Image (tube, coloured by chain):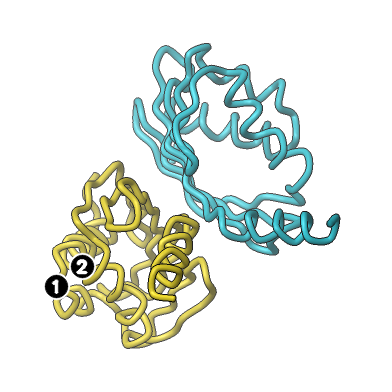
Chain colours: A yellow, B cyan
Amino acid sequence: MTSSALQIALSHHRAWTGKDLTAAMTYLADDVVLDAPAGRLTGIQAYREFLRPFAEQFLVRAELISAFGDDTTALLMYDTETIPAASAPAAECVTVRDGKIVHNRFIFDRLPFEEFRRRQAGAGA
Amino acid sequence: MTSSALQIALSHHRAWTGKDLTAAMTYLADDVVLDAPAGRLTGIQAYREFLRPFAEQFLVRAELISAFGDDTTALLMYDTETIPAASAPAAECVTVRDGKIVHNRFIFDRLPFEEFRRRQAGAGA
């Protein structure tokens, strides 16, 4: 269960799910590439803006389901309790090079978040 | 990369993404529990009905991104090319007992499938 890539991925995970985005960003390469459900984002700032609303507005708590890794790759699955959804699990496949996360394939179900956004928009109309 | 749980999870994966649902079902326990984005399903028949529209109607091809496992757990991430979405990645955390899959936590983004369903409904109206 322990490996360099896994340790870095888990440290990053614990930081951002602990809502410390500044600490979480220290594990990312400057030119990190994030393949998220809505498309590809490049660079630390874009990555931070992707995580920020989730970490700061929606996330109640996160719980690791499973995590594996080897020298270069870590694969994580975790559940999150969020304001829009009681269970909003996610999976990340993280590639590490020279001690930094250079790529992340990030999977989650956008549907409950989209439905929440529509309800909020409807309530505000 | 090789382990009992991983071998079983990959054999199951190859079978259903190869559209052979009958072969895929042979890797499941009769009372398999599937935690899918829409909720919990129990039993082989419910599992098959969950996979069937995806495998038979939508799936063009699947490509493994990463897979790890130990004696009891396998964690898979893969991308799929589908009719509704050119890239529809998924992750599965599979628990194996006595050589059969007894639990699967299955994550994918339902949004492109929901949007496709709406477009189809709109086109048919």
- Tell me the amino acid under the disc marked 1: Asp
Badge 2 local density, few (<14 within 10 Å), some, or many (20+)? many
Q: Which residue is depicted at the point 63% across and 52% down? A: B63
Task: Give the numbered dot on residue A16.
Answer: 2
* Residue ID at (37%, 85%): A46
Do the numbered discs 2 and 1 sit on residues whose CB atoms are within 8 Å? yes
- The image shows residue B95 at horizontal and vertical percentages of 39, 27
Which percent across, then down, holds residue B120? 79, 56
User: Looking at the rendering, in which quadrant would you find the C terminus of chain B?
Assistant: bottom right
Kind of element beneath mark 1: loop
| Distance in Å between CA atoms under marks 2 and 1 | 5 Å
Residue sitting nearer the eye, A5 or B106:
B106
Q: Mark 1 points at which residue?
A: A20
Residue A109 in the image, given as x and y percentages of width and height: 47, 55
Please identify the quadrant where the N terminus of chain B is shown: top left
A90 relative to A56, above or below? above
Label 2: chain?
A
- At 32% from the left and 85% from the top, the residue drawn is A44
- Tell me the amino acid under the disc marked 2: Trp
Give above or below for A48 relative to A109: below
Residue reaching furthest right? B124
Output the chain of dot 1.
A
Query: Which picture quadrant has residue A27?
Result: bottom left
* Numbered disc 2: secondary structure: helix
Q: Is residue A63 left or right of residue A44?
A: left
Q: In this view, does B104 lie to the left or right of B90?
A: left
Horizontally, residue B41 falls left or right of residue A65, namely right
